[in-house]
Amino acid sequence: MHLILDRVPYDAPDATALRDAQQAELHVRYSSEDHEPGEPPTAANVPFFLVARTADGTAVGCGGLRPLGAGGLEIKRMFVLPALRGRGVATAILRRIEEEARTLGCPELLLETGTEQPDAMRFYEREGYRRIDNFGHYAGEAHSVCYARTLV
């Protein structure tokens, strides 16, 4: 599948629509609208955000980077529309995010997903991420599952 990866502001209309779709899916998976510990991502704290588009310009996936303390970076809001999963969209987004992290001098990327997202867990493990102890706001959270990947 031919994809165009556009860097956009976090609050761009297509980015917002994709994140809204992601949150609707997570509300169902977790049977709750309160399923994210810690500070929610915003335009102010996610300076790098991508929207993946098909050749005709349709927005089909997204993901971004949020700076953490001490120069770390966290992957936030990775999402692909369900109808297009398994076609390389998430991998393309992830590779571009990793490229940006390397450019920023980040030696290791961190992320959090959840226990009700086994498909995400399999994806990250397949892409070389290793399970780590929950970090930051996710420490002690029963539904959080954290991963890291060394980039150097």
Image: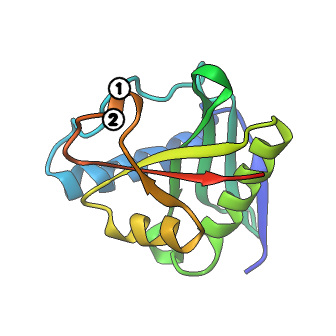
**Where does the N terminus fall, quadrant-wise?**
bottom right
Measuring 35% from the left and 28% from the top, which residue is drawn there?
137
Measuring 66% from the left and 52% from the top, which residue is drawn there?
150
Depth check: give the residue in front, 7 or 103.
Answer: 103
Picture disc at residue 53: none
Horizontal placement of 119 versus 4: left or right? left
Judging by the rendered image, the residue that carries numbered circle 1 is: 38
Tell me whether the residue at label 1 lies in contact with that at label 2, contact meaning CB atoms closer than 8 angstroms. Answer: yes
Give the label, 1 or 2, closer to the camera.
Answer: 2
Depth check: give the residue in front, 129 or 49.
Answer: 129
Judging by the rendered image, the residue that carries numbered circle 2 is: 138
Depth check: give the residue in front, 111 or 31.
Answer: 111
Q: How far is the residue under mark 1 from the one under mark 2?
A: 7 Å
Depth check: give the residue in front, 119 or 68.
Answer: 68
What amino acid type is highlighted by mark number 1? Gly
Dividing the picture into quadrants, the one containing residue 68 is top right
